[in-house]
Image (spheres, helix red, strand yellow):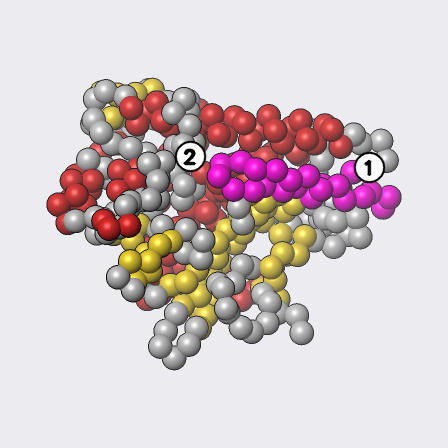
Amino acid sequence: MTRPPSAMADGRIHRLAGQTMGTVWSIHVVLGPSDDPATVGRAAVSTLDHQVATFSHWDPTSELSRFNAAPPGRVPVSAELWAVIEPALALARETDGALDPALGALVDLWGFGPPGPRPADRRLPPDTEIMAARACGGWRRLEPDAATRSLRQPGGLRLDLSGIAKGHAVDRLSEALSAAGFDHHLVEIGGELRGQGVKPDGLPWWVEIESPPGAAGPRTLVALHGLALATSGDAERAFEAAGHRYGHTLDGRTGRPIDNGLAAVSVVADTARQADALATALTVMGPLAGPAWAEARGIAALFRVRSVAGPREIATAAARDMMDEPA
């Protein structure tokens, strides 16, 4: 068994934070006596700027926005965009569209995209508009071609990679720190985390799995040493209409926000991109199909479920092996 690399005994933890991709980011990195914190800051800003320039659907000049505005035809994409769209489409095929990177029109229609919330008196879109948005989207219409590294733009299709792009950005930031010689760090973007190496005391990066608002019970911790954690839920981006809460996670197969009783799904995986995408897909699958699908594939997943009897948790065997609940 490979031993984890040991952090320098005289190392100190330096923290940086900022805003990106519509949320906050932070880095905890172990520095040696001669390390310059400014090097960490430059690596972080450069990496994150590139991620925004590629994946932002809020920036009209980003590569993603340019694809969304492109006329019908095949559109070559960068290696960076391909590194996200290829695994996203693979998971879309494996889950029958539980993860769908081509729902931008539906995201906008429901008020979660760049156009902003719908008017209060028309908060719920009519069925005709939902059907129209579904018709111009959907992952099957992209027809990826690895040989030319291109996607088909059928006209009007809008990518939305919010179910995987943050995790990918976490990975890229972690990789940039390691490439700069900072092997011991914890990276977070909007609740998606990845830990590498160990802290100066030799212990791993212990992090708390995010709980839904009002959840009771002990904290659930997991050690991120060469691992990543992502959580998908409706705690932050949601609206209420006619006495019902509508979260931002959409099911492309129905064209509507999910309504399956799940408050949140957390996944631990080797990469943050993988954890992010899986958490999104499992949230759409729901509290019955999701745990069974994850268990069959050895995925470490924790499901937080709402019910009339009160909140409950479903953890896969792989997740139970990783979790710790301190007194």
Question: Residue at coordinates 22% horizontally, 29% vertically from top-left?
Answer: 156
Instruction: Point out the tag, 1 or 2, that comes first from the N-terminus.
Output: 1
Give amino acid for label 1.
Gly
Residue 145 visible in the shown view: no
Q: Where is residue 268 shown, x and y percent of the image?
A: 52, 54
The amino acid type of the residue labelled 2 equals Val
Contact between labelled residues 2 and 1, with CB atoms less than 8 Å apart: no
Q: Name the image quarter holding the C terminus.
A: bottom right
Q: Relative to the observer, which residue lies in front, 269 or 297? A: 269
Report the side of 301 relative to 186 (left or right).
left
Q: Find residue 10 and report its horizontal and vertical position in percent.
A: 86, 44
Name which residue lies at 80% across and 52% down: 201
Mark sitting on residue 84:
2
Question: Where is residue 53 shown, x and y percent of the image?
Answer: 47, 25
Mark 2 surroundings within 10 Å by alpha-carbon count, few (fewer than 14), some (14 through 19), many (20 or more) = many
* Residues shaded magenta: 9-31
Write down the quadrant of residue 171 in the picture.
Answer: top right
Indicate left or right for 188 with 115 as reference: right
Quadrant of the rendered image containing residue 44: top right
Which mark, residue 301?
none
Q: Mark 1, residues whose alpha carbon is within 10 Å: few (<14), some, or many (≥20)? A: some
| Residue under numbered circle 1 | 32
